Image (tube, grey):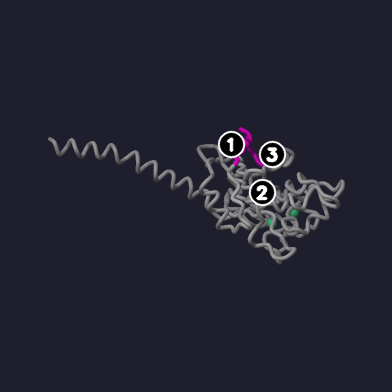
């Protein structure tokens, strides 16, 4: 009788713990897939009815309200999310590193991300850093990178260093251009999870669009975009080919 009692107590204590661990692992695993692989989940309302955008920024490197508003507008325009878009802003301590590798970024996400896809809500994670990318080479700059199916990093320090001054674009325009471009990759552009309806991939530059005016043109995520945003020039938008691909993959 004593033995039986002991086994029963052990069983009760063990089961909930292991269930919780397994579901944590499953949830985290969902967010570690290739860029573009969740495009249909993000675009359509088949599985997920709403989207949560968690913006994790290092102290002093919060994106402008206008850029966040532009992002919400873009999501509203292209994604079928009848239950809405929720933005969660989370400030974290600035690490002050001279540069960040993608491995550094993944560690920062792992340590700080709190929003995960749950039931009918799909969660995404956008990280804003206080330093440049470790992949910069001379004047060739990496301003942002999508690195998992729901994750992107924006090198906000590089944006701030190149915005707002004489002959430089306004900060919110630069932010919107890079954030929206990286979101385009997460939405499977170009040919990265959203199948091309008609051929428009600039294969020499990977998953980018061949239209120099399109938001998904390759130079948009490099330093070469600066000059195009000065003055009254608008933030680039998806061209017809890119919009068509999103629509065909469940978008609106
Ligand atoms: Zn790109
Ligand atoms: Zn395009």
Among all residues in the image, which is located at the extreme left?
1
Residue at 62% over, 38% down: 89
* Residue occupied by mark 2: 183
CA gap between label 1 and label 3 equals 15 Å
Residue 31 on image: x %, y %: 53, 49
Decide if residue 174 is in sight here. Answer: yes
Magenta residue span = 77-91
Residue closest to the eye, 80 or 110 = 110
Q: Percent x, y for residue 48?
A: 56, 39
Q: Is residue 131 magenta?
A: no
Taking the view exactly as shown, the residue that stands out farthest to the top is 83
Asked whether 124 or 190 is in front, the reply is 124
Residue 171 image offset from top left, x and y in percent: 77, 46
Judging by the rendered image, the residue that carries numbered circle 1 is 49
Label 2 CA crowd tier, 10 Å (few <14, some 14–19, many 20+): many
Ligand 1 sits in which quadrant? Answer: bottom right
């Amino acid at each position: 009788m004593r033995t039986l009692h002991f086994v029963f107590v052990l069983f009760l204590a063990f089961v909930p713990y292991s269930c919780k661990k397994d579901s944590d692992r499953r949830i985290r695993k969902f967010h570690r897939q290739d860029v573009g692989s969740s495009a249909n989940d993000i675009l359509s309302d088949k599985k997920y009815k709403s989207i949560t955008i968690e913006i994790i920024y290092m102290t002093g490197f919060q994106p402008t309200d206008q850029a966040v508003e532009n992002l919400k507008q873009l999501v509203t325009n292209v994604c079928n999310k009848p239950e809405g878009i929720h933005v969660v802003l989370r400030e974290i301590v600035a690490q002050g590193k001279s540069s960040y590798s993608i491995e550094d970024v993944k560690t920062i996400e792992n340590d700080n991300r709190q929003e995960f896809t749950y039931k009918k809500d799909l969660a995404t994670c956008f990280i804003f850093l206080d330093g440049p990318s470790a992949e910069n080479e001379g004047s060739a700059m990496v301003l942002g990178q999508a690195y998992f199916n729901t994750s992107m990093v924006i090198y906000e320090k590089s944006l701030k260093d190149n915005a707002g001054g004489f002959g430089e674009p306004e900060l919110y325009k630069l932010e919107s251009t890079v954030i929206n471009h990286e979101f385009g990759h997460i939405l499977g552009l170009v040919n990265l999870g959203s199948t091309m309806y008609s051929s428009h991939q600039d294969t020499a530059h990977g998953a980018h669009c061949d239209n120099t005016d399109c938001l998904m043109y390759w130079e948009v995520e490099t330093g070469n975009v600066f000059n195009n945003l000065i003055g009254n020039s608008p933030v680039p938008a998806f061209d017809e080919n890119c919009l068509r691909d999103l629509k065909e993959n469940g978008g609106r």
